[in-house]
Image (spheres, grey):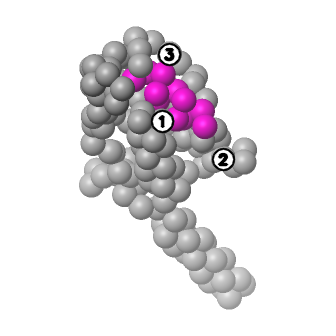
Amino acid sequence: MKTKQWALALILTAAMGAATARSVPLVEPERVLLPTTSQTQAPRSADSVRATIINGAQSLGWVVVKDEPGKLQLKYNKQNKHEVVIDAIYDAEGYQLKYVSSINMNYSGLDTGAEIHPGYNRWIANLIKTIGLVSQ
């Protein structure tokens, strides 16, 4: 009987270790400043930044779940297994992405800093890159 308990403890420890290995520090990206429009060198408007964020996000499968002046809430669902919700806080000069919530992403808001599945940081970096391409 003790061998079974020991084996169960070993399996649980290994599973916990695997879950921990699947987490990395959550990176909150810096505010992104967008360049002026290339055709006229005129400053952007908050509405044009909003449209740029939406276009870039939708091209990657992100969905707008809330739209209010100065803030979009975006959701990304990966194969109905993982889900992430972020806020895109914007104005006429740029935007900043902030984590809101997630499902099945190993999120842990530790005192030393939040941790999350490594896919989150990749998805956010890819979103920023794509929004930058759309803005040109």
| Residue situated furthest top in the rendering | 69
Magenta range:
49-59
| Pointer 3 residue | 67
Q: In the figure, is residue 63 to the left or right of 23?
A: right
* Residue drawn at the location 72% of the way across and 48% of the way down: 79
46 or 61, which lies in front?
A: 46
Residue 28 point in image, percent of width and height: 33, 45
Whichever of labels 2 and 1 marks the residue nearer the N terminus, that label is 2
| Pointer 1 residue | 134
Q: Is residue 72 above or below residue 35?
A: above
Whichever of labels 3 and 1 marks the residue nearer the N terminus, that label is 3
The local crowd at label 1, few if under 14, some if 14 to 19, many if 20 or more residues have their Cα within 10 Å, is some
The local crowd at label 3, few if under 14, some if 14 to 19, many if 20 or more residues have their Cα within 10 Å, is few
Please, what is the three-letter code of the amino acid marked with disc 2? Lys
Let me know if residue 104 appears in the view. Answer: yes
* Residue drawn at the location 31% of the way across and 22% of the way down: 40
Q: Which quadrant does the C terminus fall into?
A: top left
Judge whether residue 54 is colored magenta: yes
Residue 63, which numbered label? none
Q: Is residue 105 above or below residue 136?
A: below
Let me know if residue 99 appears in the view. Answer: no
Please, what is the three-letter code of the amino acid marked with disc 3? Asp
Please, what is the three-letter code of the amino acid marked with disc 1? Val
* Residue drawn at the location 53% of the way across and 56% of the way down: 119
Residue 78, which numbered label? 2
Looking at the rendered image, the disc whose residue lies closer to the viewer, 2 or 1, is 1
Task: Identify the secondary structure beneath mark 3.
Answer: strand
The local crowd at label 2, few if under 14, some if 14 to 19, many if 20 or more residues have their Cα within 10 Å, is few
Q: In the figure, is residue 79 to the left or right of 34?
A: right
135 or 20, which lies in front?
A: 135
Whichever of labels 2 and 3 marks the residue nearer the N terminus, that label is 3
